[in-house]
Amino acid sequence: MSSMDEIRATFFEECTELLEQLEGGLLRLEAGEQDADTVDAVFRAVHSIKGGAGAFHLTALISFSHEFETALDGLRSGSVEIDAVVVATLLRASDRLGDLVAKAIEGEEGDATIPDDLAELAARASAGSAEEDVDFGLADLPPLDDAFEVTPLDLNMFEEDGDAPDAPTAPRSKAGGYWEIQFEPLPDLFSSGNEPLYLFRALHVMGRLEPRLIESDLPPLEELDPSQPRVRWIIDLYPSAPDLTETEIESVFEFAQDLCVITMTYREPEVPDPDPAPSAEAEAPETPDSAELTADPEPTPPAPEPPPQRPAAQDSKPAAPAPAGPKGGLSATIRVDLDRIDRLVNLVGELVICQAMLSQSVLKDGLGSNSDSASGLDDLQQLTRDIQDSVMAIRAQPVRSLFQRMTRIVREAAQMTGKDVRLETEGESTEIDKTVVERLSDPLTHMIRNSIDHGVESPADRIAAGKPATGTVRLSARQQSDRVVIEITDDGKGIDRERVRARAIERGLIPADRPLEPAEIDRLLFLPGFSTAASISNLSGRGVGMDVVQRAIRDLNGTIATHSEPGKGCTFSISLPLTLAILDGMIVRSAQQRMVVPLAAIVETQTMDSARIEPISPMRSVVMLQDRFVPLLDLAEGMGFAAPAQIDRRADDDSALLFVKPDDLDAYALRVDAIEAQRQVVIKGLGDSFGRVPCVSAATILGDGQVALIVDPGGLALASDAIRGPAAFEGHLS
Amino acid sequence: MHVLAIDDSRTIRDMVRLTLEREGIESTMAVDGLEGLEILKAMDPQPDAILTDVNMPRLDGFGFIEAVRALDVFAGIPILVLTTEGAKELKQRARNAGATGWIVKPFDPARLVVALRTVTGLR
C-alpha cells in the first residue's frame, strides 16, 4: 500500500468520525443547544471533509460539501436563523454527505446534486454574508496520482490582484547579464516572520550575489527601533542559469510582496561576450571591486540589522526530535492497525493457555501451593490478567458512534411511518469491544425500526391514549460487572400478546390449546418463522425477523430479553460480554467429556448430596434453589452425550449441581459429574464447517492441550425438553 | 529543518508529514492552536517554521499566530498559513496577526517545500 493509499484510508476513517461529529452537533442544535461552539464544530466537520476531499479530487464530495459549508457559514455568521426547518434540512444534507462519502469509499462518484432546500439555505447564507468565497479552482484540478505529484495549484500569497507576469512575457536573463534588484523592506516585514537574510539565501541559489547596503536612512542609534527595518539593499544577481526569469526571482519575494518595495532591472553585460558558450558553471563576468559572496552566503550587512530572534542556522542540520517534556508530547493518541491489536489479543490468549498449562504441570509435579513455583505462577496469573485487561481496553470503543448512527434510523423510520419519534440516548461513553460495536449495528437498526413500526403509536392514537404526541425511543448502555447491557425502550403500546399468540398459532408454531405465560408469549417473537415482516410493513421487516436479531446477539455470546407492559411500552435488553476473546468459565466433567460453563451464567453451585431433589416423573426431577423449585437437567443428557436417565446419586460421587440462569430465561439446575476448576479460557470459534451447533457457543483449549466445548446455557435450556416441558415449541427449536 | 504543523484534520496532517518526510524535513504535529502553542513552548530547539490551518477547534489559526507573535522569543519564526480559504480579507487578517505567508489547500507538495525553504533560509 503506498503512503498515499494510506492517507486516503485515513481520510475516509476521518470522514466517518467527522460525519458523527456533524450529526451529533446537528442533533444538539435540534435539541436547542445553539451555542457558537456547536455551530463551529458542525461547520468544521463539513469544512474538514471538503478539505480532505480536495486533496483527493473527489469532485462530488467537494461540490456538495462546499454548498453545505456555505449554508453552515450562514449559521455561523448569523445570517441564517436556526430553526427546526433549517436543522431538518441540514440533517438531510448530512445524510446525503454520508452517502457521498460511502460512494467515495467505494471509488464511485455519487450524485452531487444539491437538494433544493440546501441550495436555498446556502443562497440565504451567502446573501447575508459579505465575505466572498474565493473559488478554489475545482475544475482546474489535475488528477492526483499515487505518486503524489501534482502540478502547481494555487500558492496564493498576499499579492495584489494583478498576478505576477507570466513567464513567457517576462524578460529573461542572457548569458553575461545580471539582474539589479532593489529591495526595500517596509516596517512590517520583520513582524511577519520574513527575514531578508533568508530571502538573500534563496536568491543565492539562483546565482552569484553582489549586495550593496543603503544605510542612508539609518537614524541615530538612540532612535533606532530594532524591530523595524531601516535599511535597503541593491543586489546584483548574476544568474547561474542563463534563462532565469523575472517571475522566478519574484517568487522568492512572494510572501513579502506587500511588505517591501521590489524593483528589478536586467542589465546587459558591460562587455558584450563574443563567445556565447553556456556557462552553467556560473562563473559570471568578474566585477573586480565587489565583495563577492561565496558558497556560504552570509551577506552580513555592516548596519545594525535587527538580529533574528532565533539562532540563524547555517545549514539544514538535523533538528532535534520532539521534546519529551511533560507537556511537550505530541497528540496523546496513536492509531494502530486493528490487525496488530488482534495479533496481540491472540497472543494474550496463548499466554492464558500457556499459563494454565504451566499451573497444571506444577500441580502434577507435586509442587505444593507454598512452593516458589506456585507463588510465582500466582503472580504470573495476575500479570496475565492485567495484560489481558489492558489489551481488551485497547479494543474497547464507546458505543457513541453506534448510537449516533441510530438517530438516522429513527428519523427515517419515523418519516416512513408518519409517526413522531425522538431518540433519547444514555451511556454513550460505555465501552465495548470494537467488533461487538460493529456487529450490533444491524440488530439495533432492526430493533429500533421494530419499536417505531410496531410499538410507537400514531400521534392521534397517542393523544387519544393520553400520551404526548411524540413517541420516545430510548437507547441506553451501561456496564454491569463484566457485561454490557444495552436497552431499547419505547413508550408505545407494548407487545400485543393476543395478536402475537394468534399469529404463532396461525403459523403452527404453538398448539392452539396451549396456555402461555405473558413472558412465554413475548419469547415467541424470537421464533424463526414468526416474523411479521411480510404483511405488516416494509419497514421493520426487510425480510429479517427477531430470530435473526437473536442469533446475531447469540453469536456475540450475548443474550436478549424483553419486558413489555401493555399500553406503556416495551424494552428489549441485550446483555453482551465485554470481550469476545476470553471467558471466565467453570471447567466441568460430564460423560468423560470436559466442558466449560460460562461463569457469568452460574448463580450457585451445590454438591449433589446437599441438594434437595424432588422427582416429578420417572425421567424428570426438580431441585430446590433458594425457596423455589427449578428444573434439573443432566449436562451429558442435554448435550446429547447420554440418554435421558434417572439422576445418579451414588454417595461417593463427585457430581455437583450448577444453578444456571441465562439472562433471558428462567434458572435451572445443571448436573455435572465433577467440577474441575474455575479459570479463564480463550474462546476459539468452532470453525465454519460446523455451522451453528445448538447448546455450544464455542470451544477452548485447556491447560493440558485438550479441546473443550463451551456450553451455551441459554441454548441448552431452549433445546431441552426437561426444562421447556414436553409440549413447548416442540419441533421448532431443534 | 524542523517544522511544527497544526491542523485539525488528520488527513492533512498525514499529507503534510509525508510531504516533509520525503524531503527529509522533520515535523511535529498538533491538532489545534492551543496544542500547537503548548508544543511550541516546549520545543527545544524551536521549530524552524510553523504551518497552521485557520479553522480549528479551541484556538483557530489567527488566534494561534497572534499568541505566538505576542511572545518575543517567537517573533522571528516564519508562520505559513495552510488553508482552503482564499478570501482576501482573511489573508489580511492573517497578515495583521503576523503570518509570514499563505498557502491554499489542496497544496502542491513541491511548492510547499520551496516556500518553507524560502522562509527559513534552510535547505
Image (cartoon, rainbow, N blue to C red):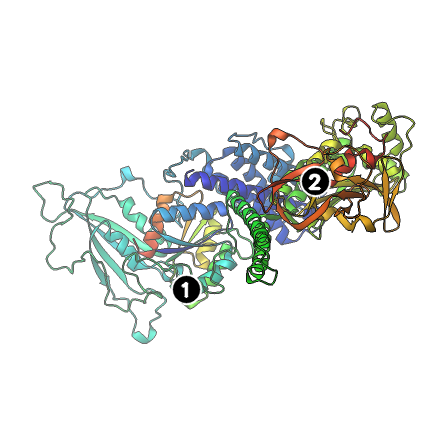
Label 2: how many Cα within 10 Å (few below 14, some 14–19, many 20+): many
Question: Does residue A156 show up?
Answer: no
For the residue marked with disc 1, what is the amino acid? Phe
Query: Eyeballing the image, is A470 above or below B75?
Result: above
Label 1: element kind: helix
Q: Chain of mark 2?
A: A
Seen in the image, is A699 located left or right of residue A177?
A: right
Q: Position of residue A212 (x, y in %)?
A: 21, 60
Question: Does residue A220 show up?
Answer: yes
Which numbered tag is attached to residue B74?
A: 1
Which residue bears the numbered disc 2?
A: A711
Q: Which quarter shows the N terminus of chain A?
A: top left
Label 2: element kind: strand
Q: Position of residue B102 (x, y in %)?
A: 42, 50
Residue A258 image-quadrant placement: bottom left
Which numbered tag is attached to residue A532?
A: none
Q: Chain of mark 1?
A: B
Q: Nearer the viewer, residue A83 or B111?
A: B111
Seen in the image, is A599 located left or right of residue A466?
A: left
